[in-house]
């Protein structure tokens, strides 16, 4: 299960965890410590995990994000994710829809890394 950590001098700055099976992958969680946000770390982690999944033959990556999480949705949009569905009342505390996003990893890039 791919798990990348962005490490600072003394602390964990951020991490991303994903899974991949055959040609499909999923980003399970991506987070950056509040004091390190808005410096490109989240975007860097996202790009790195897509690269890693692509190198393992993944050509499509999915994830779910809270509908109200505008910051994460903007980041994922920048990484090439597009909305492909909605899961109603998917989250608890508070109850909220999940937006299902998908990004294609170009097959050329994926196969070039194999
Ligand atoms: C979402 C999260 C990982 C972003 O991390 P980050 O390191 O701050 O993100 P970056 O600095 O790489 O920003 C990348 C893009 O995200 C968007 N973004 C990030 N912070 C934003 C903010 N406060 N307001 C609006 N857009 C924002 C922008 O599009 C930004 O690109 P830009 O700086 O060129 O405008 C971070 O806010 C976080 O950990 N949030 C809590 C956990 C979470 O919601 N995870 C996602 C669900 S799995």
Image (tube, helix red, strand yellow):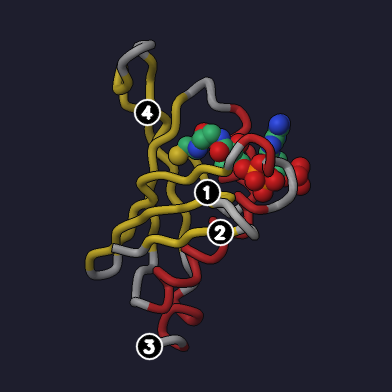
Disc nearer the start of the sequence (4/1): 1
SS for tag 1? Answer: loop
The numbered disc on residue 81 is: 1
Seen at 41% across and 84% down, the residue is: 111
Q: What's the distance in space between the residues labelled 3 and 1, CA to CA?
A: 23 Å
**C-beta proximity under 8 Å, tags 2 and 1:** no
The numbered disc on residue 86 is: 4
Looking at this view, is 82 or 64 the one in front? 64
Looking at this view, is 103 or 65 the one in front? 65
The numbered disc on residue 114 is: 3
Nearest to the eye among marks 3 and 2: give it: 2
Q: What's the distance in space between the residues labelled 4 and 3, CA to CA?
A: 33 Å
- Which residue position is annotated with label 2? 6
Disc nearer the start of the sequence (2/1): 2
Examine the rendering and report whether any part of residue 67 can be seen. yes
| Mark 2 surroundings within 10 Å by alpha-carbon count, few (fewer than 14), some (14 through 19), many (20 or more) | some
Seen at 60% across and 55% down, the residue is: 10
Give the answer, above or below, for where 93 lies relative to 109: above
Residue 90, image quadrant: top left
């Amino acid at each position: 299960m791919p798990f990348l950590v962005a490490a600072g001098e003394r602390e964990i700055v951020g991490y991303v965890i994903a899974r991949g099976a055959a040609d499909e992958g999923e980003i399970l969680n991506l987070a950056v410590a509040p004091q390190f946000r808005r410096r490109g770390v989240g975007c860097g982690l996202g790009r790195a995990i897509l690269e890693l999944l692509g190198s393992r033959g993944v050509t499509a990556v999915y994830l779910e994000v809270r509908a109200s999480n505008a910051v994460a949705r903007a980041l994922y949009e920048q990484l090439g994710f597009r909305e492909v569905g909605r899961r109603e009342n998917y989250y608890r505390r508070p109850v909220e829809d999940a937006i299902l996003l998908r990004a294609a990893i170009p097959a050329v890039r994926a196969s070039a890394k194999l």
